[in-house]
Image (cartoon, rainbow, N blue to C red):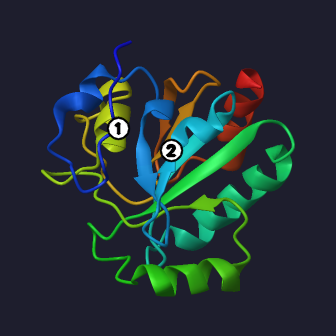
Amino acid sequence: MSEITSPDVEDAYNPQWQEYNSIFDFTVKDLDGNPVSLEKFRGKVCLVVNVATYCGFAYMNHKILNELHERFKDQQFEILAFPCNQWAQEPACEVDLKEYVKKKGIKYQVFGKINVNGKNTIPLYRFLKSKQGGILGNAIKWNYTKFLTDRGGQPVDRYSPTTGTNVIAKDIEDLL
């Protein structure tokens, strides 16, 4: 692969993402606005999910994510959560999101707010959707859509917001 600089989160128009081979080629922003290379998760199975604190699915999905985190945290598994306000259910700023993460005792990785659809979709989500399309097209239909990636950073499955812990856990186990 040629030397490519990962596009910044704000650079959603950058077509370089199409040359990337895995999620580990991307850089995203943390809740403080600092760049984070997903390379640091190389060799781990990852569950990438768009989250929203005011979504009706929030309680159920935080429970699922916490259960998965606790069950697999010592087995080369990471949850990468990305707050998204495209359905007007994550109005909080990053400062408030950090407080929410602390208050709820969330132990998995939570990054800065993003767009998962439309012209401002971050490159990571463009990549994920291109590799694991949805039933009615590639668009993310709602909060808590999840992408499971293998240790090589390849998306291998996509889950709806209502997919239960046992289904996802079995697939994680198969990859570990």
**Where is mark 2, residue-wise?**
37
Which residue is at 26% across, 66% downward? 86
* Residue 151 seen in the figure: yes
Name the image quarter holding the N terminus. top left
Q: Are marks 1 and 2 in contact (CB under 8 Å)?
A: yes
In the picture, the disc for residue 165 is none
Q: Tell me the amino acid under the disc marked 1.
A: Ser
Res 134 seen here: no
> With respect to residue 124, does 87 lie above or below?
below
Q: Residue at x 44, y 79 (%)?
A: 94
Of residues 117 and 19, which is closer to you in this image?
Answer: 19
Q: Residues within 10 Å of mark 1 (few under 14, many from 20)?
A: some
Identify the secondary structure beneath mark 1. Answer: loop
Mark 2, Cα crowd under 10 Å, few <14 / some 14-19 / many 20+, is some
Distance from the alpha carbon under mark 1 to that under mark 2? 9 Å
In the rendered image, the quadrant that contains the C terminus is top right
| Residue 143 image position (x, y, % from top left) | 40, 60
Can you identify the residue that label 1 sits on?
6
At horizontal 68% and vertical 81% (from top left) the residue drawn is: 102
In the displayed structure image, the side of residue 39 where residue 129 appears, left or right: left
Q: Secondary structure at mark 2?
A: strand
Q: Amino acid at mark 2?
A: Ser
Report the front residue among 43 and 79: 43
Please provide percent x and percent y for residue 58: 53, 70
In the displayed image of the protein, which residue is found farthest to the top?
A: 1
Question: Where is 12 relative to 149, above or below?
Answer: below
Mark 1 or 2, nearer chain start: 1
Q: Is residue 108 left or right of residue 176?
A: left
The total number of labels drawn is 2
Residue 83: x and y in percent read 43, 66
Viewer-proximal residue among 142 and 153: 153
